[in-house]
Structure formats: C-alpha cells, structure tokens
Amino acid sequence: MEKQLLRITVNNEYHELYVKPKRLLVEVLRDELELTGTKRGCNTGACCACTVLLNGVTVKSCSILAMQADGTEVTTVEGLAEGGKLSPIQRSFLDHGAYQCGFCTSGMLISATALINEKPSPTKKQIKEAIHGNICRCTGYNSIIRAIKAVAEGKYKEEE
Amino acid sequence: MIRDFVYSKAKTVKEALGLLEEHKENYKIICGGQSLLILMRQGLVAPANLIDIKSIEELSYINFKPKDGLKIGAATTHSEIEKSSPVKKHYPVLVSMEKNLASVQTRNWGTIGGNLAHGDPAGDPGPVFVALNATVKMANKERERTIPLEEFFIDYFETALEDGELLLEVQLPVVPPRTATVYEKFNIIKNDQGIVSVAVSITMEKKGSSCKDARIVLGAAASIPIRAKKAEKLLIGQKLNNGLLEKIGKRASKEADPVADIHASEEYRRHLVEALTKRMVRKAWDQARKPAR
Amino acid sequence: MKKYSVINTPIHNIDGIAKITGRAEYAFDIKLPHMLYGKILRSPYPHAKILKINTKKAEGLTGVKAVVTGKDTLGIKQGIWRRFKELCDEEILARSKVRYIGEPVAAVAAVDEDTAEEAMDLIEIEYESLPGVFEPIEAIKEGAPQLHEHAERNINVTRHIEWGDVDEGFKKADHVREDWFRCSSQHHVCMETHNAVASFTPDKKLTVWTSTQSHYYIQVLLSWVLGLRENDVRVISRYTGGGFGSKFELDSAQFCSSLLSMKLFKPVKIILTREEEFMATKRRTPMFYYLRTGVKKDGTFLAKEGRVFTEGGAYTSMGATALYLTGFFQAFPYVWPSYRYDGYRVYTNTAPTSAMRGFGAPQATFCAETQIDLIANDLGIDPIKIRRKNAMYPGYEVPGQATIQSCGLSQCLDKIEKWIKSQGKLPPNRGIGIAAYGFMSGGIFNWFDTPYAFSSAVIQVNIDGKVDLYIGSQDMGQGSNTTMTMICAEELGVQVEDIRLHMGDTESCPVDLGAWGSRETLMQGNAVKMAAAKAKQQIIEYAAAKLSPNIVYDLDIKDRWVHLIARPERGLSYYDVVKEAIRGKDGQPIIARGHYTPHRKGMISPAYSFGVQAVDAEVDPDTGKITLKNCVTAHDCGQVINPLGVKGQLEGAMAMAAGYGYTEDPSMDEGKILNPNLVDYKVLRATEMPETKVIEVETYEPEGPFGAKEAGEGLTNPTAGALGNAVFHATGLSVKNLPITPEKVLEALKEKKKKKKK
Amino acid sequence: MGYKCPSCGKIWPDTMDLARHVFGTGDQAHKDWVNSKGLNFIELLLIQTMEPGNKGYKTLAELLEKEAEKVD
C-alpha cells in the first residue's frame, strides 16, 4: 500500500513524512520520530500509557491513525520540560513519588497536564476521573492524585 | 495486525457519500475509530477501503432550538456533548451519561455517530437517546431519511444503515414539561461499559399526580437496547407505590433477554435489570414531580 | 547531631528525572541498527503431541529471515530450581509435546512485526490432540491424563511442615472449625510486557537487553540452554517496567530472540503482546485450601492443620517455593503450639503458576484471616483481641523454621484498634474488616544453586570524592536504586548526590540474586553497607594520621566531615582527605567490596515484617457491589530508609491486593483464558481507590542494614482477607471463594434470606 | 538411638519423624522405596490429605518400624 504524506507538528517541531495509512499515531511517534517516552501497554485501547496531547486535548495515540492526525499539533512527554526546565506537574510528581516503574508515567503526566490546563483547581474527584483511563500497576494512584492536587493548590507556581 | 487498506479522507458530506458509492460493499467508515481500530488490530475487520469522515466540519455541531429541540452532528465528540451548555440546560442526563462513558481520552476523540453506528448493545448513548425519543438522520447519494433510533438498532453490532449510507445527525425532540429522564449502568470499575444499564423517562400528568408517559430502556440486556414496554404500561396512568414499583421491576426483568458472559450470568443480569429499573423509575418519578426550575 | 543524615528522609527516586521526562530507555524502547523483529507461534491446544512442523512456506515469505522450532534448540529442560533435576521440566520451545494453550512451538524473525505475524499463519503444524486436565483435584486422580512421564498422578512437588502435637492440640480444643477455601489466580499486569532484544556477534558473544528482575538469573539460564559460556552472555536491564514476580525466570522473548539472533548474527527484538502476557506468562498460583483449627474458649490457638492442592499448570517454574511459603505463612503471624501442613503442587494443562507478589502468602493470609474472624464470631470474641492474644512477639521461635527478632505486631494491633474506635458507629451495609500479616525479607534457600554470595557490592571513591557504587540488584520500580544509594551515602558519611550508581548490567555489576522475595533492602543493603564501611575505614586511616590526636579518638564521617567522634568540631573535609588519600595510595582510587549471604537463619528468611490492615467497605444489598471506603495499615518494616518509597510501596501493594480480593477474575475454560485483555480483566483504576492511611511502627531489625527489613511485598497479603472480613461484618456472610464478586455476594445474601425464612 | 532412612540414610529420632521426612522429601528415590514395599506412595499422600487423623503417616511409620535400620 503506497505511503501518504503526513504533516504533523510534534513538541513544536514541524515534520513532513510519508507513512502507510494503517500506521497508528503512536507508531509514528515512537518508530519514525523516535519519541519513545510515549509507551504502549495494551492492544485494546484500555491502558492509556500512549496518551498524548492532540490540539490540546488528551487522546490515545494507539487508537488514532497517524493520517487522522495530519495537520495537528501533538505534545508528548518529551515536550513537557522546556529548555531543561521541568513543568510544575513534573516537579510535583518528583516530590510526591508519583511514579515507580515509570512505564505509565508519560501518559499519566500528559493526562494531569491536560486537566490542570482545563481546570486549574480540580477537586479530588475530578482528578480521579481525569486519570481514570490511565492504568498504573505500581503506585495505587494516591501519590499521583496528591501530586496533581499539590499543583492545583498552587504549590508549584512558576517562579524559581 | 492491521491489514493494509486504501485510505481516503472526506472533507464534505457530498464527498463522503461519493466515496461510499464508489467503494460499495468494500469499505468501512472511520470517525473517532475508538472501537473500529481495536477490531482492525485484532484482524476481525479488514476493509479494503477506509473512509475517514472525522474532519468533516459540517458534521460537527450541537444546535438547540426551543421549538424543535436538539440536533447533534454525527462527528460531534462525546466531550463536546458533555460540555455543551444547551445540553447541560435542557438534557442534563446526557451530561452525566457522557461523564461516565469510558476514559477522557476516548471521549475526546470518539464521536456520537461512531458510537451509535457501532451498534454495541452495551453502549451508553443508545438507551439514553431512546429514552429521550431520539431520531437519526441518514443519507446516501440519492436520498435522506430519518427514523426513530429504536428502529436503528437491528442486532448485535448491526444497524439500519444500508450500504452506501452515512449517519448524519441525532435529533432529540423538545422534552415535554414535568418530564425527568435518568440513567444508570452497573459496572465493577467506574466508566466501564455497563454489565446492565437502564434509562427511564417519566412524564407526569398536569396535576402531577399520575404518570402520563413512561419509557423504560434496557442496555446490555438483549442484542440491542430494548424498551420494556409491558413495564411501561404498568406505570402509565398510575401513581407510583412500592407494590407497583416491585411489579415494574419484575416485569422489566422478564422482558429482558440477556445472555451469560464472563462478567455475569443470565440470572444475575436479570436481577440487575430488576434492581436498576426499580431505582431509576423511583428516581425519575421523584424528579418529574418536582416543580420545574 | 541528628541520628541519620540521609536515612529516613524522603528522597527523590534517583531515576526520577529520567522517568518523568520520557528519557528512561526500557528494553521495550531499544532499537539497534539492522534490527529484526520476532514473533512467537503458540500452541492452540492445552495438551497435544506435535507430529510435524513445516516452516517452508513461512521461510519463503518476503521479509522473513529465519524460523526456529524445538529442533533448533539443545532440547534442554530448564528450570530455576537448578538443584533439583526433576523440577527442571520446561523446554520453552516444545519439541514433542505441548502442555498448555500458549506454549511456544516456533519463532519467526522478519524485517518488521507485521511480516513476522503474517509468517506465523504460514507455519503448518500437525498436532495430535490429547485429553487435558485443568483442576488439581481432577489431575491427581487415578487415570487422569498424565502431563509428564516422571510425575505419577501429576504430582509435581509435595511439602510437609509440622511442629508440636497437632492431634493432642485438637483433643484439648473447646472449639474446632473446618473450612474450605478457593483462592483464584491473578496476573501481574506489568505495564511493560515481557520483551527482549538479543544480539549475537561472530565472536560468539550474546548481549540481551531485557525487562527482568534478575539479570544474573537470566544470564545463567540463557548460557545453560544455549550452550554458551556464562560470561559470554551479557544481560542488560537498566529500567524494568514492573515485575511483581513475573520477570525472574527465563521467558520466551529472551529465549527465542537469542535463538534467532544466534542463527542470523543480527539483533532480534521480541515484545510480547498483552494477550500473550495473559495467555502464556506465569501467574499467581490458584489454591484449594482445607483448614482445620482448634482453639480454647478464650480464643487461645491450640492446633491448626492446613492441606492444600495448588494448580501448578504445565511446569514447575517458581511454584515449588510458593507451595512452601503458603504453608509457612499459613501459621503467620501467630503463635501456634502445634501446626501441620501438607501441600501438593499438581500439574495441569494450564499456563504455569508461579511467583507473584506475596508468593503464596496472600492465599494463606486470606484463608487464615477469614477463618480467624469466623472463629472469633463463633466464640463472641473481638477480632482484635483474638489476634492480640495469639500474636507473635520478639524472640519467638517458630519451631524448626525461624526465629523472630524484631516484631511490632502488637503495636500495629493497638494502632488499628484505635483507628477503628475513632470511626464510631458505621452506617448500614458498611463494615470494617482487619487482617494481620507478616512477610520475609529475602529467602535463605539456594535452590538456584549459585556459588556466589547472595548479594555483593563494589565501591570506588574517586579523586573528586564522587563514589561509584556497583550493585547487582534490580530496580523494577520498587526503588531499590534509591535505597542502595541512600544506604551507601549514610554509611560513608556523604550525600546522595555524591554517589553514582551502576546497575542492571552483568558485565559491570557484581552478582546479586535479583529483586524477588523482598530481598534487596536487607541483603543487597547489607552488602552495600559493608562495602561502604570498608571504604570509610580506608579514608579514616589517612585522616587519623593527619589529625594526629594526642589521645586516640574514634573517627567517623558524617555530611562529608571527617571528625573525631568525641570532638566533632575537630575534623577535615571529606573531599580533602579523599584527595590526599588517593595521592598517598600512589594514585590508586579507594576500592572496597561488600557481600551478604544469610547463615544459620532458619529455613525461610533472616527477618520478617509485620502489620495489620483495616479495610472499610460498603456493600450494595440490591446488587452485591462492593465499594472500598478506607484502607488503613499499621506496619512494621524496621527502620524506614526512604519514607517516600515505603508509602508508595504500601499503597501500590494495597491496590493490587484489593484487585485480587474483588475485581481481578481470570476466567478459564478448558485451559483457555477468556479475558486476556485489560478491558475484560479488571485492575483497579484511580476511581476505585479508597482513602489510604499508613501508620509506621518503627522497630529495629538487628539483621537488617540500619535496622531495616521488608516493606511492600508483604502488604499484598492482608487486603483480600481484610476486604472479605469487611463484607462479613457488613452483611454477616463470608465468601470463601476469591475473587469476591458482586454476583457471589448477592448469591450469599439470597442464601441468607432463604435461611431466615426457614 | 534413631532410625535410618532406607532411601537416603538420614537419621531420625523416631519412625514418625522418619515417615514425615520420607513424605516431605518425596523424590523418586523415596517414592520408589515406599512403592517397593507394597504401599502406594501417592495413595498414602491422598489419605493423609483428604482424611483427618494423620493416617498416611501412621501407616508409613508402622512400615518403617519394621523396615528401617535402628542406629545408636
């Protein structure tokens, strides 16, 4: 099957590449653009380890054809820290030990980032609902919830 | 593994219908693809042509008119419905239904049209829209037609959509006064598909004393979302009391036609239909009796 | 001066930055030049003879580079119980017979995954299907289909534990209770599925990047089955995306990718799909439990008899250990004057059952703690009181098995009792259940037959004071890298940022048996502490000469300050001393080794953690649905090293164990798993998590580094039992068959109603 | 004073302990010895597990009383 032109901006970098129509967005991100921070944990769209921001909202990059993302702007975990400066969510994840094996962490960070962008001060219930799709087998989620809550409470305002 | 296919992205409905016509019998339509891509990855679906309607802007809208009600374009995402203010105001049950549908990620990309066209009896929108008396608009290259959503569902993963036909719009009539519509699904993990789900819509008589009209819709309790019409009849024209509520629950569970799977036995599903029907009828009744805000 | 400057301060996981920026490179992410992709063809039959395999067509497909089958192997029956030949019974690539659905029969390497997958459909295999047997009770019966020639009646391993006079104990008992339990299986569900990238080069050296809990085990097992020299096999595992017991045996990805690479002299990568993970990797051992227990009127335990049949699946794997540990922990954490245990592991035509977090103890604890609440109820005794009355205590000896040194169980019971009281009267359909537990801090047994010390560490102090720490232990998320760094920094008297850690590579790291059985903190920790102490000694010797105190004071290092203990203000900068010391050593860096192997520590472990957990749950009487409200745990893990790590471990264990208790239900039919995906197999999500509270009860474990012992694995033991007891107190009925699904609860509620009517 | 395991030679204070050792070990050698004496090792195991009263061990202990070599 002949490849088609995909124009996509990932972490503020514009790319033009040719991909087979059957390629999933996550495959293009990991294999073509070598952004392996985005993980895959299942084949049934059930674990959300592959979560990325697409035009500002969270999506499962394993459940979107790359061609469907033509002309969009994507942010992956590699795009969260700018110029080596960690984002508030990232710093809070560090302080609260909100990760263990780290394999679900990229998707979790993206979900958390999207939530804070949309609702700067979510309730605990809203936090749980926002990361409901992201499976973490290590932490039991509560440290992640604490980390997001801390950001919501303004503990990581951009200053230092 | 996903088999290769020819991919074409339609920008307008006209273009899409043209492509459907061209590839008759040998295509699949993808919108959000949240269900379709899983089937394709498992090799259960392997179309020669994939027609992408996700980016057809004229299919993505939510319009409300006080006279003729709500119209939702087929390519509207679940999140857009969940966050729409007219929906919040006039059809609040849709908001709670959407909030409990799968993950945020799925709702952000998955569409209402795709969900209904998938024809999964365990889907959430089906029962609720049927309870709200929804109709759906479809078109092929020649003509347009509109049918009640109830008649849209044919069997497991089978709908009334004909070859070459595209789902365009879901339409909801204006909600009559003194009406309440409620929905609940039973699951073990929040936002999973319901092991059983029940939507109930009740309209009270003017005096607010007895039931004027009722719709009881069961999800995951048969091969399609079904109305428990006998149970509805028990309620219409009556005042609700515990004795009647018991009868309605029992009747609904008789009308259900569930199958056993790894998540629940047939008996347990019938029990759940009874329990949830009772809960939802009670809830809708109490809400419908409250004077409108 | 503060007792510790590093220990017991919440420290960022030292892998944190890499993990939160997406830079951490897992074997899953490895991509090498000219790398090929492999897929494994698995048996669709639970029990069958392999008559013929034809790979011609597959090999003919464009893009396919090689196909291997059992014929291409040395046909070695491998196993992790190397000391016992009979228990090494798994070939990984079956040659003549398959014994479970999902057993590997062939592997393909191709230019990409899709081509490899297509090729699998072209491999023609002729099977002769044999009758299968799927339940241990059936498999042990006369005339049942036999899986292995050597295993009469399919009995794989038997275990017997006994002390005291059990028969006498039952005679003396005022109350005797018999109960039967059924403990289900459970899947590890590591977010990173099993995978490996193998690269064999013409110099006959094999390098394998993989996701493992023990690179040493994988190195040894691979060299054995491939006929290579042990140290010509290099295993690298910098990051591991979860283990939980599923990743310290040789797996099909590691074996098949190596085999293919040896044939092609090119790197081959194999990633197991989530479905393969469910269908064909190891899992928690299902158990049929019979318990007979005798107690006095006042609740004093007298005698206990436990008999167990475990569903072994097709091969031994780590199941033999689970069979022993479930027997031992069945008597935990209480004083039993007499106890008798007989366990039988039976081969069945199902995927092998093995180690999973808790290693047989969660099953034991569920049965034991459920029965204790039933007994307390029979006798009208408070659940806390009956447990306190019989609780283990420091210095207690488990006859012939173990000596308990540190033990904070009674304090844990006090804390939980206090919390329960603080909750006041609960609303209807709510209940609080408790369960007490304990667990080991690493096993003393050496069935793997390693000639090495169980744990080793090497330290090199460089001219700038930076310390290179080489350890063999594996971090799979539990945070041992951070723990070891902290132990090293504390002992040496420097800070965490002075340490540069080297791990996850058999080429540069000393041997450690790996991250299983909660061994790292105590065993690797002791080795690190010893190495650090030796290095410190060398530094202090130079300082002593330099400070030349008129009277000899003892010296120590703390916060990079080398000083006289009696006069802390008199001292030198650690950095200066190190510089001069190395110059003085003719430019040789300061190097020290440490090692640990438990000696004369009984049959099980050098040290044991203890705890009590309370689960507060609500039951919906209309549907039987369980909702978790609160989960409070008081636990004794000795001296806490990293509070941040401990808390994460406890919450994570609770979530996994709660799943075992009520949501995770692997449905099997004739050896086939019916829900091999994360949609139908239900792990807890954030929305199901209750409020969690952790109460530290600090004790000092003399055998552990700085008094530390196990934390995190033992916490998988109590939750199912506590949850079951919560349901019991909310509804008056106890479900003895895991998982406690709404349907089972509802059934029980109906039974209860019927009884009432009668 | 003790009893010597006829299979591996390990010494035990009494025949009951020796019986437990034979079961506990349960390898081919020990199985074979029991079976060679006209008892069925696995039958004894099943009796021991399925029925209360420690029957399996008692039966084996009686056999060992006769067969096992006494040592001082």
Image (spheres, coloured by chain):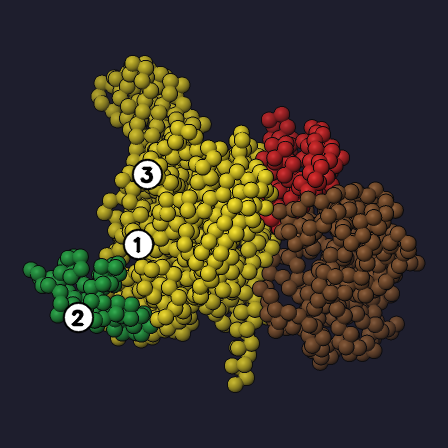
Residue D63, numbered circle: 2
- Of the chain colours in the picture, the one used for chain A is red
Q: Spot the yellow chain and give its letter.
A: C
Q: Is residue C583 above or below residue D1?
A: above
Task: Identify residue type, mark 3.
Answer: Ser
Q: CA distance from mark 3 to mark 2?
A: 45 Å
Taking depth in this image into account, of C618 and A30 the one nearest to the observer is: A30
What residue is rendered at 70% in x and 29% in y?
A: A15
Can marks 3 and 2 be said to lie on one chain? no
Taking depth in this image into account, of A7 and C630 the one nearest to the observer is: A7
Give the residue pinned by disc 1: C86
Residue C642 lies left or right of residue C700; in this view the side is right
Q: CA distance from mark 1 to mark 3?
A: 27 Å
Residue C94, horizontal then vertical, whole percent: 42, 51
Q: Is residue C605 above or below residue A77?
A: below
Residue C455, numbered circle: 3
